[in-house]
């Protein structure tokens, strides 16, 4: 396991997220192979299309920032997996009250080296929990439990908000409320890594 490979994959991941948060769409796109795929709460498909849809979402006023924790990279030959603990922060307004929607998740990347070049091949997410933080002391916000009931607990506020903006939110996402599915996912990732 070469340290240079770990550093290269780490920088791919960090440049991809920086591109997303700074709205540097060409930088975000450049980290992916053309056949790369993305699986998020609101999107499932090609990575390049995800970049286009992220740009469109931003143009429609949905702005978010990803707070990143240290990532862990595993390399085996020409394959790598990287896990990035993340908190998505989205400033929104609910009933005239400014809040920040905070969604905690783990972003899992696959990276692949082709012809001596590393790029990202896949992005998956494992959702943990979310909550709302009121930004002005003394104010409060209320969301009816019935509005949240259709959505799974690890990403119910995120799903509720995205649905209110017209996005279709997938119900089969990986989440810590389904530990057997998460364990099976990690096992698939380990198998893929070691197929090289």
Image (cartoon, helix red, strand yellow):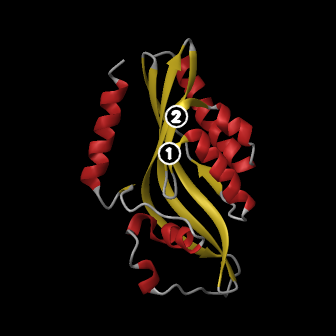
Indicate which disc residue 117 carries.
Answer: none
Q: How many marks?
A: 2
Q: Nearer the viewer, residue 183 or 163?
A: 163
Residue 177 occupies which quadrant of the picture?
bottom left
- 98, above or below 58, in the image: below
- 41, above or below 146, in the image: above
User: What residue is shown with label 2?
Assistant: 36
Mark 2 or mark 1: whose residue is earlier in sequence: 2
- What's the residue at 57%, 30% (across, down)? 34
Relative image position of residue 72 (x, y in whole percent): 48, 35
- What's the residue at 74%, 59% (across, down)? 59
- Residue 84 visible in image: no
| Circles 2 and 1: CB atoms closer than 8 Å | no
Residue 64 occupies which quadrant of the picture?
bottom right
Relative image position of residue 121 (x, y in whole percent): 50, 31
- Could you say whether the residue bearing mark 2 is in a helix, strand or loop? strand
- Determine crowd level at label 1: few under 14, some 14-19, many 20+ residues with C-alpha closer than 10 A: some
Relative image position of residue 76 (x, y in whole percent): 40, 20
Alpha carbon distance from label 2 to label 1: 9 Å
Residue 156 occupies which quadrant of the picture?
bottom left
- What's the residue at 52%, 58% (across, down)? 42
- What's the residue at 59%, 85% (across, down)? 141
* Quadrant of the drawing holding the N terminus: top left
Q: Nearer the viewer, residue 70 or 185?
A: 185
- 103, above or below 36, in the image: below
- Residue 75 visible in image: yes
- Could you say whether the residue bearing mark 1 is in a helix, strand or loop? strand
* Quadrant of the drawing holding the C terminus: top left
Outermost residue on the top side: it is 115
- Determine crowd level at label 2: few under 14, some 14-19, many 20+ residues with C-alpha closer than 10 A: many
Relative image position of residue 160 (x, y in whole percent): 50, 73
Indicate which disc residue 45 carries.
Answer: 1
């Amino acid at each position: 396991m070469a340290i240079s490979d770990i550093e290269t994959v780490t920088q791919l991941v960090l440049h991809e997220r920086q591109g997303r948060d700074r709205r540097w769409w060409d930088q975000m796109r450049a980290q992916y192979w053309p056949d790369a795929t993305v699986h998020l709460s609101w999107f499932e498909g090609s990575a390049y299309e995800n970049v286009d849809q992220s740009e469109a979402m931003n143009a429609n006023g949905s702005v978010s920032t990803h707070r990143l924790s240290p990532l862990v990279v595993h390399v085996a030959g020409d394959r790598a997996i990287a896990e990035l603990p993340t908190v998505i922060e989205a400033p929104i307004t609910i009933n005239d009250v400014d809040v920040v929607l905070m969604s905690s998740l783990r972003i899992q990347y696959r990276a692949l080296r082709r012809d001596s070049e590393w790029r990202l091949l896949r992005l998956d997410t494992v959702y943990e929990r979310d909550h709302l933080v009121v930004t002005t002391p003394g104010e409060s916000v209320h969301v009816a439990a019935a509005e949240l009931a259709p959505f799974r607990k690890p990403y119910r506020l995120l799903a509720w908000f995205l649905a209110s903006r017209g996005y279709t939110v997938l119900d089969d996402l990986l989440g810590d409320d389904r530990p057997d599915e998460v364990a099976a996912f990690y096992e698939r990732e380990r198998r893929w890594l070691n197929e090289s």
